[in-house]
């Protein structure tokens, strides 16, 4: 059992050496894309929520 765990960890480390990690500029640009996307989706959902809430208030009144 212990040998299987050690083999798994060794194989995992070898695979991690093969990974092409993004550089700082890529991480920064991807982060900005995510932040802008979240802001846009949040604004859209806020707008939809506001419109639906106003419709519901008019129907109830």
Image (cartoon, grey):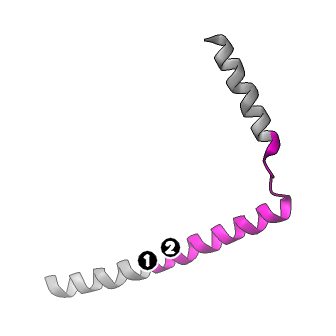
Q: Secondary structure at mark 1?
A: helix
Residue 60 appears in the picture as rendered? yes
Q: Is residue 58 magenta?
A: no
The residue pinned by badge 1 equals 46
Mark 2 highlights which residue? 42
Is 1 placed left or right of 12 in the picture? Answer: left
The segment highlighted magenta reads 17-45
Q: Quadrant of residue 7?
A: top right
Q: Is residue 61 visible?
A: no
Q: Residue at x 64, y 67 (%)?
A: 34
Asked where in the image residue 24 lies, by quadrant, the reply is bottom right
Residue drawn at (80%, 52%), measured in percent from left and top? 21
Count of all numbered marks drawn on residues in the image: 2
Which residue reaches farthest top? 2
The image quadrant where one finds the N terminus is top right
Residue name at image x 75 percent, y 39 percent: 15
In this picture, residue 60 sits left or right of residue 3: left
């Amino acid at each position: 059992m212990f040998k299987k765990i050690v083999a798994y960890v060794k194989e995992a480390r070898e695979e991690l050496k093969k990974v092409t990690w993004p550089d700082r500029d890529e991480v920064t640009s991807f982060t900005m894309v995510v932040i802008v996307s979240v802001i846009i989706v949040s604004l859209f959902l806020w707008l939809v929520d506001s419109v639906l809430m106003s419709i519901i208030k008019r129907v109830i009144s």
